[in-house]
Image (cartoon, rainbow, N blue to C red):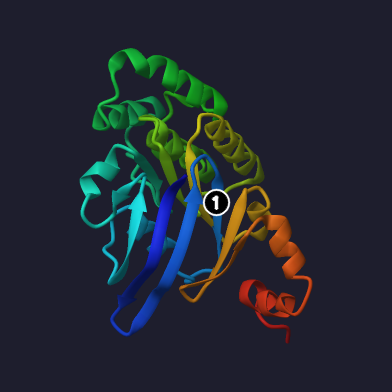
Amino acid sequence: MFSIQAYNLTKRFNHIIAVHRLNLTVRSGEIFGLVGPDASGKTTTLRMLCGILQPDEGEGRIAGFDILKERECLKERIGYLPQRFGLYGDLTVLENIQFYADLYQVPKKERRDRIAKLLQIANLEPFTKRKAQDLSGGMKQKLGLICVLIHIPQILFLDEPTTGVDPLSRRDFWIILYDLLKEGVTILFSTSYLDEAERCHRVGLIYKGELLITDTPSAIKNRLKGVLRPIFQDIFYGPKV
């Protein structure tokens, strides 16, 4: 069963084609890595799938709902963590979480245990009274993830959440994601880090808006040993000079 389905998704910004006829399926309960360099179309793809950005062509279904016709139905079933999440700097860690719990209408009786569990996994228990503006970059990202997860989404979209994050926070981040997989959450994770791709069940390599390869990390590594390796060396690291 597929939780995420995209068929020929295309998005243009004036004369620039940000995403071109993208086809993608993500199975329920897996973590899928959308991997590519900056300006490759990762953010645009995620925003279309979340119903935030309307595609110019193509169609998509998330948890069985049409991303064009049933956007309102998506809100209760997905969580989306953009590169810059809307934390309130003058509120404490706990106040931010409570705010999003109110926003998602999480029942009061379910909040305490859910918040306690997420704080523990994210190692943010000692910082509940600290204002969000005083947190490190990695701690802000983990707080943002907690806020997105407070309503227990079926499908989680993460847009380069570990970019610029310290190694310890990156480790904590992945611990949280693996814990979510145990609960059956489907995760679409975009990144420009090739090492993070190896943590995913399957990976799609995207470049200039086109999805080039989709397979398991090990299968893609084997394919890159041949003639494709120099091509992807240029894509991710730039041509040798």
Q: How many numbered marks does the figure carry?
A: 1
Left-right relation of 177 to 233: left
State the residue at coordinates (49%, 25%): 119
State the residue at coordinates (40%, 40%): 133
Q: Is residue 172 above or below residue 67?
A: above
For disc 1, the neighbor class at 10 Å (few under 14, some 14 to 19, many from 20) is many
Give the x, y percent position of residue 228: 71, 77
Q: Nearer the viewer, residue 157 or 173?
A: 157
State the residue at coordinates (73%, 57%): 218
Q: Nearer the viewer, residue 115 or 35?
A: 35
Left-right relation of 147 to 27: left
Q: Confirm whether residue 123 shows in the render.
A: no
Q: Confirm whether residue 148 shows in the render.
A: yes
Give the x, y percent position of residue 153: 39, 35
State the residue at coordinates (34%, 46%): 64
Give the x, y percent position of residue 70: 22, 49
Q: Is residue 193 above or below residue 241?
A: above
Left-right relation of 25 to 111: right
Q: Nearer the viewer, residue 202 or 64?
A: 64
Q: What residue is shown with label 1?
A: 32
Q: Going by the picture, which residue comes out furthest to the front?
A: 1
Q: Secondary structure at mark 1?
A: strand
- Position of the C terminus, as image quadrant, is bottom right
Give the residue type at disc 1: Phe
Q: Is residue 14 above or below residue 224?
A: below
